[in-house]
Amino acid sequence: MSNSIIVKKRIKDFNKQIIVSGDKSISIRWVLFASLANGISEAKNLLMSEDVLAAIKAIKKLGIKVLFKKKTCKIFGKNINGYKYKKNITINARNSGTLARLLPGILINTPYPIKLVGDNSLSKRDFKRISDPLTKFGSKFKLKNKKNLPLIIQGSSNLNSIKYIENKGSAQCKSAVIFAGMRANGTTLIKAKKSRTHTELLCKHLNLPIKTIEKKNYDVIKVKKVKKIRALNYKIPSDISSAAFFIVLTALMKNSRLIIKNVNINPLRTGMITILKKMGVKIFFKNRKIYKGEKISDIHVKSSNNLYSINCPTNLNSSAIDEFLLIFLVAAKAKGVSSFKNLDELNKKESPRLKWGAKILKKMGVKNIVTKNSIKIFGNPNLKIHKKILIKNYLKDHRIFMTCIVAALSFDGKSSWHIHDKDSIKTSFPNFLDVIKNMNK
Ligand code: S3P
């Protein structure tokens, strides 16, 4: 079967209600917490994507039983010290930065070295950002070229608490240190630039001795040694980063409406909504509720014929980090020049998304000026694309594939897009193309 897709036709205006799959960040965290819990935890609507399956495979290697029954996943935790560490364990995190960065925090007390590997994209990413703080606890981490995977974790049974300043707005780094802090003597103090709070909210819900003090621009997190984690049943809400493709598809249409049900709207994940609203997209949250500390809502979107450019506030960067490729598409269709700054982190994702986003816009005929950490996009509300566009060799980045499908289906003109690496959607949103097909019915 071909691993590429050709899109020649625009989608017709729609009025739909959809559901997107379970949240990836919460699914991976639930798997990890459940594997450390004392008893059986059950999750419904767990995201069945390769990143989450890699997490499940990892805990199985560590001696934790996992069962799937109908749509429920059961994890048989043996409490916080219940992993069965063996000699010569290799764990493959595949494409998952979240798994690969959180696990070393959890495995910091392993009695035998554990090797962590990943796919081609993950092997290019920076792991010094977690090995630096984790080393301070008193364990050792060996990296290829001092930065990349494979990573060898050489644990220690005697871990000291640390003080750590997280200044990238990275929830992965923050979470790795929270997990390690749970195993250390004393109180670990983290001063973290604001980023998604799923780990902290799970800790709070589980009554663990982890406290967050919220300041205006950062959080202070105090982590004490954890003796016991209770089992946790969870109904995973939908992923706002998956909903984002359909929010932007609606925004780029002329006269469409969409409702996306039961989406996690953790305030440190909704930067894209704030940005798109400022750009004139009509988005509303309805039917809001709180579930185990997480905010959940239905998202209503209407297309708007007036999209405005934006000088994007940099304090929204972390909370929109996975959605910038999509935001760039809206900027391409907006009136005026949009400007996005301090985006260094965007080039450190599954692929260098700032650089490659700019390249894709150029292919579409959208003028832009890109630097190492910023981009200016010259929008054109009347943009029509009349060419063949080939999207190939983008490190199999799932978000690049799905963003290009959204662009191909929504921009006017007689274009023909040939988009490679369809399989990449298995990473985060395996039924993405089924939901797309349903929009066209
Ligand atoms: C994630 C955090 C973000 C995000 C990633 C998922 C998480 O990465 O880009 O897709 O689940 O903690 P950083 O922590 O590196 O910003």
Image (cartoon, rainbow, N blue to C red):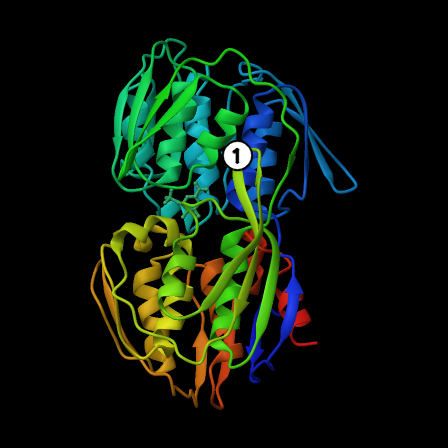
Q: Quadrant of residue 290?
A: top right
Relative depth, front residue between 410 and 247: 247
Q: Is residue 421 visible?
A: no
319 lies above or below 227:
below
Q: Is residue 412 visible?
A: yes
Mark 1 crowd level (few <14, some 14–19, many ≥20, 10 Å Cα): some
Identify the image quadrant of the C terminus: bottom right
Residue depicted at 50% across the width and 48% down the height = 265
Amino acid identity at mark 1: Gly
Residue depicted at 50% across the width and 44% down the height = 94
> Could you tell me how many numbered marks the image carries?
1
Give the side of residue 40 with respect to residue 92, left or right: right
User: Where ligand 1 lies, by image quadrant?
Assistant: top left
In the picture of the structure, the residue carrying the numbered disc 1 is: 293
Give the side of residue 167 with respect to residue 330, left or right: left
x and y percentages locating residue 123 in the rendered image = 39, 45
Give SS at disc 1. loop
Identify the image quadrant of the N terminus: bottom right
Residue depicted at 33% across the width and 71% down the height = 359
